[in-house]
Image (spheres, rainbow, N blue to C red):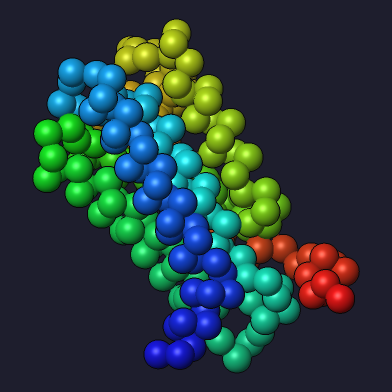
Amino acid sequence: MRWLQLYLRSRRVPLALGVAIAVIVLAWVMSSTYTTSTTINARTASLTIMLAVVALGATLNGADDALDHTASVNWPLRRAGHLLIAAAVITALLSLSALTDVRYEPLALVLRNTAGLLGLTALGTAVFGAALSWIAPLTWTLIAVLPFLGPSADVRVQVASWLTQPAGTTAATVCATVLAVTGLLAYALRGGPLRPASETAPDR
């Protein structure tokens, strides 16, 4: 299993996982302390999921781009597995709140937002690289949590604010699914773009 340890370390997974856990716990503590609701609201949950996704999104590229594209490794399968495990980890961490009096729920909203934001991050990684993959999920989340964008019968609003729409909203679910599938395929098949050697060479 040494290859797994090396793989996780090369992608800074322990650090990213620590950040994701800290963000989820901090949002839970804040909601427990300053609200009387037993359910963490959609805006807070969306921001929390986005920050956790961005943290793990940094692990989608390794330090050596050439190694990440070598033909000796089945990279599409490994990338897809990495992404799916990241989604499972974030969902599991959020679901642990079900053991407490303040919860991230409903589960359908947690699953939808995690899948959509992780797909958006993976798509950003495939196009711009992991270092800039946070831009799209951060921007869309900040738009979605705007006070004037809430539950609406307008499909355009439902798409723009899909993160904060109620679970079961068709347009929001479709939007998240498209982002998840597109991001998964783009990242699994392409990975991140090759950076100039000067950017990946170790410091001397």
Where is residue 128 drawn, in percent x and y? 70, 52
- Asked whether 171 or 77 is in front, the reply is 77
- Asked whether 190 or 203 is in front, the reply is 203
For residue 174, above or below residue 196? above
Rendering quarter of residue 111 = top left
Q: Indicate left or right for 155 with 6 as reference.
A: left
- Asked whether 20 or 152 is in front, the reply is 20
* Residue at horizontal 24 percent and vertical 19 percent from the top: 35
* Residue at horizontal 35 percent and vertical 34 percent from the top: 27
Where is residue 164 drawn, in percent x and y? 36, 25
Where is residue 158 drawn, in percent x and y? 40, 21
For residue 119, above or below residue 145? below
Rendering quarter of residue 34 = top left
Quarter occupied by the C terminus? bottom right
* Residue at horizontal 62 percent and vertical 49 percent from the top: 133
Quarter occupied by the N terminus? bottom left
Q: Indicate left or right for 197 with 94 as reference.
A: right
Where is residue 155 drawn, in percent x and y? 40, 19
Q: Indicate left or right for 2 with 167 as reference.
A: right
Count every numbered label the image shows and give the total: 0
* Residue at horizontal 53 percent and vertical 54 percent from the top: 57
Q: Residue furthest top?
A: 148
Q: Is residue 172 visible?
A: no
For residue 21, above or below residue 196? above
Q: Is residue 92 visible?
A: yes
